[in-house]
Image (cartoon, helix red, strand yellow):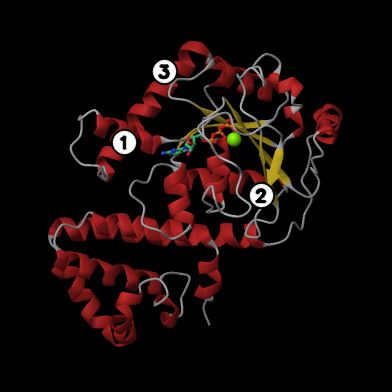
Amino acid sequence: MGQNLGVLLNHPLTGLAVSLGSLWLQNLSSPKDKVIGEQLLLQTLKNSTMNFNTNDLKTIMPSQGSYIDKMNELQDTIAALEKALDRKGQESFKKVKREFDSQLKKNFKIETYFMGSPGRGVKIPGEYKTSAKSAAAENGIDRENYFNFAFVGHTNNGKSSLINAIFGLNKNDEGAAPVDILECTHDIKYYTHASMPNVRFYDIPGAGTMTHRSENYYEDKALCGFDCLIVLVQQALGQEDIAFAQAALRYDQKVVFVRSKCDVDFHLRHESGNILRHIPSPEEVHQHLENLRHHFSLELERHAPELSSIECFFVSANSLRAIMRFEPVDMLFEEKQFLEYLYQQSKSARGMY
Ligand SMILES: Nc1nc2c(ncn2[C@@H]2O[C@H](COP(=O)(O)OP(=O)(O)OP(=O)(O)O)[C@@H](O)[C@H]2O)c(=O)[nH]1
Ligand SMILES: [Mg+2]
């Protein structure tokens, strides 16, 4: 008996694989190809290592109900279906099939880990134990049972929105972190979700405002007490971002940059008339990601070469939320890489690889 899809679907991370497939479907041009594509993806899901119960598949694509009923008898027809795609369609299907399958495998591991209760304690590095311990105590952080991520950065960079998105929450949903265009988060607070019981996401007030000044921000907020800093950056790398990362390195703390709101770049381009369509193609998104990454590396090289080993993920909170809610995604940036990073950090801190 395979995994129970009903249970897996309750966990939003499964949406990552389905999003990859749905983007592929969006890019098929003819309506005939779209129907064939949908059926091929369903078959891929069914044949994947997860070995889903075909009846449960109806919950994902109810309009394919009658097809799903027949699916078991359709094995031979499936091969013909693939051939019915044009050559370009066949090639892109092969690619998406591989990605879909490997993403499902990864999702399964991530889900099993995140949904399990925090069995093993987090290992705190010995040499920084004293300062990190007192800083953690100052913020009331439990470093033994939870892996604690702190979302920091200039006000309005999208910290609270990103935390909500990881849980698949909209800003008005119960339990969501408050979100606003105006300076919004004023106190350090953590957020948890039943789907990830062994991690805590701390929302830290935005730096660089009159209430929360940038100088000594890291020390004032005792940020070394967290297990990992997620530094939300703006379009251009700022002095504060560099200061956060440098301080984290001094404390031997895990640190990563995230540039959120990547969807806004396309909305802005659309408004200024540079592109004609509102939803960019995956190629346009890919190109944009390359440009962002190139620009970001140059900035780091120029202003803080000692930070060049720190990763940066380019994401959109809106895309991430859609993925987690199984909703159609307009553009996929590096949301899945970012989620995998969170998973890896938390897991390796417990000595699990
Ligand atoms: N389109 C788009 N808007 C976003 C995204 N992330 C955040 N926003 C918007 O940006 C504004 C600021 O977002 P917040 O999440 O409140 O930012 P913050 O960093 O928590 O701000 P402070 O709490 O003041 O430090 C809000 O209007 C959000 O709706 C995103 O990925 N895409
Ligand atoms: Mg906030």
- For residue 267, which numbered disc appears in the image? 1
Q: Is mark 3 on a helix, strand or loop?
A: helix
Horizontally, residue 253 falls left or right of residue 20, namely right
Q: Position of residue 112 (x, y in %)?
A: 61, 62
Mark 1 beta carbon near ligand 1 (under 8 Å): yes
Rendered location of residue 204, percent (x, y): 66, 33
The structure residue drawn at horizontal position 45% and vertical position 59%, both measured from the top left corner, is: 15
- Residue 66, given in percent of the width and then of the height, sits at 29, 84
Which is nearer the N-term, disc 1 or disc 2? 1
Kind of residue sitting beneath label 2:
Lys
Horizontal side of 144 relative to 210 (left or right) equals right
In the displayed structure, 341 sits above or below 174; it is above
Query: Circle 1 sits in a helix, a strand or a loop, which is it?
Result: helix
Q: Which of 120 and 338 is in front in this view?
A: 338
| Classed neighbour count for the residue bearing mark 1: other residues with Cα under 10 Å, few (<14), some (14–19), many (≥20) | some
- How many numbered discs sit on the rendered protein? 3
The residue indicated by pointer 3 is 298
Left/right of residue 27 with respect to residue 127 in the rendered view: left
Displayed quadrant of residue 230: top right
Dot placed on the residue nearer the N-terminal end, 3 or 1: 1
Q: Give the class, few, some or many, for how many residues have Cα within 10 Å of label 2's Cα (few <14, many ≥20).
A: many
The residue that disc 2 covers is: 347
Q: In percent of the image, x 53 and y 82: which residue is there?
A: 1
Observer-nearest of 152 and 242: 152
Residue 105, label in figure: none
